[in-house]
Image: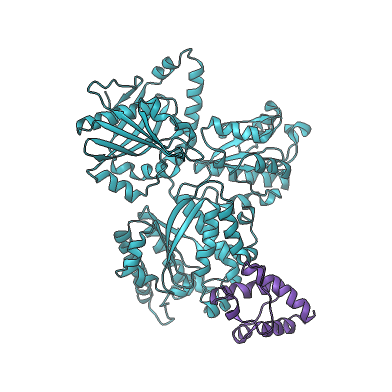
Amino acid sequence: MSREEVYERLTAVFQEVFDDDSIELKDETTSEDIEDWDSFEHINLVVAVETEFSFKIPMGKVITMKNVGEMVDIILSLGK
Amino acid sequence: MRELEYPFDAEWIVKKKKSIKRQLLENAESSFLDKKIAILGGSTTNDIKNILELFLLNQGIRPSFYESEYNQYYEDGMFPNPQLEAFAPDVIYIHTSNRNISEYPAVTDSREEAEAKAKRLVSRFEGLWNHLFEVYHCAIIQNNFEAPYFRLMGNKDASDYRGRVNFIHRLNQAFYDFAENYGNFYIHDIAYEATMYGLEKWADPYYWHMYKYAMCVPAIPETCFQLANIMKSIWGKNKKVLNLDLDNTLWGGVIGDDGAENIEIGQETSMGQVYSEFQEYVKLQKSIGVLLTTNSKNNEDTAKAGFERPDSVLKLEDFTTFTANWNPKSENLKQTATNLTLLPESFVFVDDNPAEREIIRMECKGVAIPEMDAPEHYVHILDRSGFFEVTNLSEDDLKRNEMYQQNAKRQQEEASYANYGEYLTGLSMQGTIRAFEPIYMSRIAQLTNKSNQFNLTTRRYTQAQIEEAATDPLKITLYGKLEDKFGDNGVVSVVIGKKEQHKLHIDLWLMSCRVLKRDMELAMMDELVERCKEQGITQIFGYYYPTAKNGMVKDFYGVLGFVKIAEDEDQNTVWEFDIEEFYEKKNHYITVNGQ
């Protein structure tokens, strides 16, 4: 799985969860940049990401995730 | 919305909940029933609220919410709470789980010590419930406790009084004992949900430690779906009728081709056993008041032969109506609804054929259409869908099938009279029309929530509001009960009027459609006029608010002799009736209050 491919699938997940087709993701994107991305929606986002990529993200990694770039790193590491 | 019907894709619902909500609000075909729900949580409730909302909207109920602060269910409920009082909930939902059990027995505890611990916890909850009833006068829905995530003693945890499994069983039993004694108190069985879902996944500690959810996030739709079923049942949105296909639904094979002797039913083959088990399940539905009807493409005699087999669990007399012909099933369903004076939306259409299901979906709006894919799953799909979720198993429910059989006899009797008036006389009808009385409060409240067709204002009342109306000196209340030689129809009509000097404004006038064309509405009018005269009222004002369903009473007040005095752009109408000194009684066939 390439980084671009992860970005493509991840963007689709973000757009569905936040019901907003205009969302575009960058490595630096954080919850500050997306209006509805609060702690509650973060849960749903993680569940949706797990469903999309068919693996569970361990608790330790969810806690330390700082931005979209790190989320992509985690997905790439788990997807191998 | 099909995506919210059982079996649903829970993860998809969690992901798409925002757009699902938008669609439900945009595509609403009729007006919503507005309800206020207070959630008192012992864990995070944010998505419980959001996803419960989806399932309720799908049932035509639009909720507004009060949410307690995180894990403040006890404090928010127990102590003065002006915000919650101002909110005036219709229902309080207490979302607790085994994460809220503060004290378990220790292995060193004596039996008495363990019991004292159970008692302390149960009294704390009972205190909360009693307080909530006293202050908020509304329904309470309480979670029971799911099984624990670990078992210190392994299997012995279940049988030993010091085991957590054992302890939770006792707590739950104490909750059920309370539920048995309070009509407006309902247990939400999360223990069963967790079992069905798989406790191992349900209780995944990740979701507790990360987000303080009592169950895993993908299980939230499951628990909300079941919770919404309790609520829609309380608010009169249950289905009432099973409309059943026969070939490959109630038995295996096609009776017209194979012959009654060759269909799959009975204990001889495994397929026969599957269908027999399904028939048993359907027959059990009848025992809780669900009406059984057929809708089959067959010649009538051929179809009936299937139930004449000695090994058929269902017998012909189990069906309220029997329809087997070559008409489109959508027409049959509508005709059956008319015959039973019900709306198609009270129906669950059960058919193994996807093409037939699609026709019903297109032609009969509001009918529930479960996906009957394989006979070994039929019971499961119907059962988990909760179409007939029982919240109060009333006398009326247990007797419903009997009442419809009496109605069939009435119809036969009607056919034997040349003149309708003679038929009505022949019924020897006895009416009881009185101000609201305590024993009927729950039935009266139920009627205000269930009646849609013969209902002038479609105002919904809780039992507490009905009780209030009964004691309000500024209100005139009437309930009407009708018996005849074939049986007792129970309470079938309700009127509430508000006094204003010499005027009476009718807030509510409804009647169950099971007594249409029996002149019961005239008897109610006579009695209402009588009460008005006693209290010096000279004018009655009637109001008609049109809905998608109450077209049949559009001119009701006109027929009673009211004069229309106003009509607005939404066709809401106001009617006036002047009571003259010599009011001539309109009812001639029903003996009212023994006179």
Q: Is residue B267 toward the left or the right of residue B542 in the image?
A: right
Residue A33 horizontal/vertical position (percent): 60, 79
Tell which chain the image draws in cyan: B
Whether residue B441 is situated above or below residue B198 in the rendered picture? above
Residue displayed at 43% across by 55% down: B35
Residue B545 horizontal/vertical position (percent): 43, 39
Residue B588 horizontal/vertical position (percent): 34, 19
Whether residue B496 is situated above or below residue B173 in the rendered picture? above
Q: Quadrant of the C terminus of chain B?
A: top left
In this rendering, does residue B432 appear at all?
Answer: yes
Whether residue A11 is situated above or below residue B266 in the rendered picture? below
- Chain A is shown in which shade? purple
Pick the residue in front: B266 or B547. Answer: B547
Pick the residue in front: B166 or B133. Answer: B133
Residue displayed at 24% across by 20% down: B582
Q: Is residue B229 toward the left or the right of residue B526 in the image?
A: right
Residue B378 horizontal/vertical position (percent): 65, 49
